[in-house]
Amino acid sequence: MGARIDLVVAADGRARCGWAGDDPEYRRYHDEEWGRELRGDRALFEKLSLEAFQSGLSWITVLKRREGFRAAFAGFEPEAVAAFDETDADRLMNDVGIIRNRAKISATIANAQVIAPWVRDEPGALDALIWSHAPAHRAARPRSLGELPATTPESIELARALKARGLRFVGPTTAYALMQSAGLVDDHLDGCWRADSAVAEG
């Protein structure tokens, strides 16, 4: 019984990690994305950028604006975002479809200016760097939300590696959130239907 204390059961009868709540979009994200392997430089640049915007806020705040972010940031194509200038930053500060934070907007543009030439010369380089920090062994599946860490040795090293490349807003907590959402780790709780599904798929 204790294993299910941080689970919620929706109308469909499925038990989910408690943070998914009853919001349909949050449930969809939990079911279809969180903890599943995400690959590709563009996709990971997008997720890294959104995780940075989430810092200090709830993920649902970002999730509900994701299409706005994609429109505002040219689909998170690194080359396109790298070409943004101060006029674009000013435009984004007036875009009600995103979270209007000057420091985070500037960091996203600056990060694209680092990533674009990097992955142009070495396609897959961002993907390779991020995935090189996936834990070598799967940890025991958490039984409660309280067991989920904010950082791990791997996320500390990933943050350090990203910063060494010149990226901003990539601290260990943001790095671990990225690891969770991109499937480097699977933190679905014991008893969550996605955890059971992952076992079946494995």
Image (cartoon, rainbow, N blue to C red):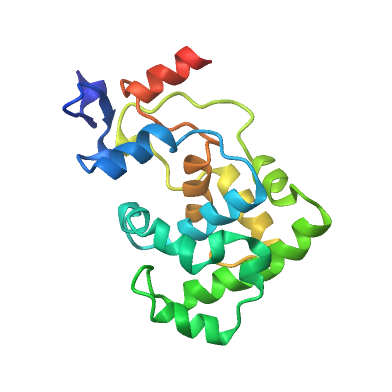
Q: Is residue 23 above or below residue 147?
A: below
191 and 91: which is toward the camera: 91
Residue 170 visible, this orientation: no
Q: Does 134 sit above or below residue 13?
A: below
The front one of 101 and 168 is 101
Residue 155 in sight here = yes
As rendered, which of 71 and 133 lies closer to the eye?
A: 71
Position of 176 with respect to 24 (left or right) is right
Residue 4, placed above or below residue 37: above
Q: In the displayed orientation, state which residue is furthest to the left.
A: 11
Residue drawn at x 45%, y 77% as measured from the top left: 92
Q: Is residue 25 left or right of residue 117?
A: left
Residue 67 found in image quarter: bottom left
Q: Closer to the camera, 44 or 158?
A: 44
Q: Which residue is situated farthest in the right direction here?
A: 121
Q: Position of residue 186 (x, y in %)?
A: 47, 31
Count the marks: 0
The residue most toward the top is 200
Residue at the image position 62 percent from the left and 50 percent from the top: 158
Quarter of the image where one finds residue 194: top left
In the displayed structure image, the side of residue 149 where residue 44 appears, left or right? right
